[in-house]
Image (cartoon, rainbow, N blue to C red):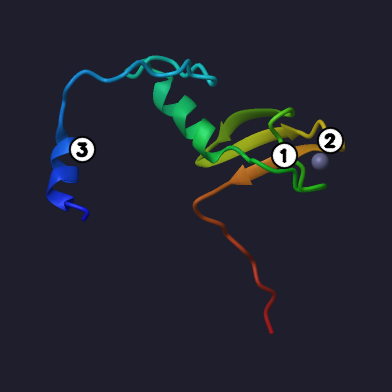
Amino acid sequence: MRDIHEEARRAAHHGPMPPLPPDPHRLPPPGDWFASDAAHHLLDRPKFCPQCAGSLDRGLISEWWSGDDRIFLTWCAECRWTGNIVLFSRATIEEPEH
Ligand SMILES: [Zn+2]
């Protein structure tokens, strides 16, 4: 039978950790000035091409910023699509009067 208290005790244990595998994404050490941006890029970057839906793992994704917008210059190795994908937290949309 599952003992949730035992699982919680194990989860809270701060003993020595087993060695971790090499980080394939080579994030900068935590605390470096760029570490937070690099981690957010890894989490939020586009994963699939908007043109062919292929994986972007072999493509190119470079991020830059314009104000609060996060802009991902994206190239797909499968179909060669190139373009910007923009993440924004707020949009201003004009609606014609009717
Ligand atoms: Zn594509």
Residues at discs 3 and 2 in contact (Cβ within 8 Å): no
In the displayed structure, does residue 6 sit left or right of residue 66? left
Residues at discs 3 and 1 in contact (Cβ within 8 Å): no
| SS at circle 1 | loop
Write the residue at 71% across / 35% down: 56
Ligand 1 quadrant assignment: top right
| Mark 2 sits near ligand 1, with its Cβ under 8 Å away | yes
Q: How many numbered badges does the structure rendering display?
A: 3
- Residue that label 1 marks: 55
Amino acid tagged 2:
Glu
Compared to residue 64, the image places residue 3 above or below, namely below
- Give how far apart the Cα atoms at labels 3 and 2 are: 42 Å
Amino acid tagged 3:
Ala
- Which badge, 3 or 1, is on the more N-terminal residue? 3
- Residue that label 3 marks: 11
- Residue that label 2 marks: 78
| SS at circle 3 | helix
| SS at circle 2 | loop
Image x and y of residue 96, in percent: 69, 75
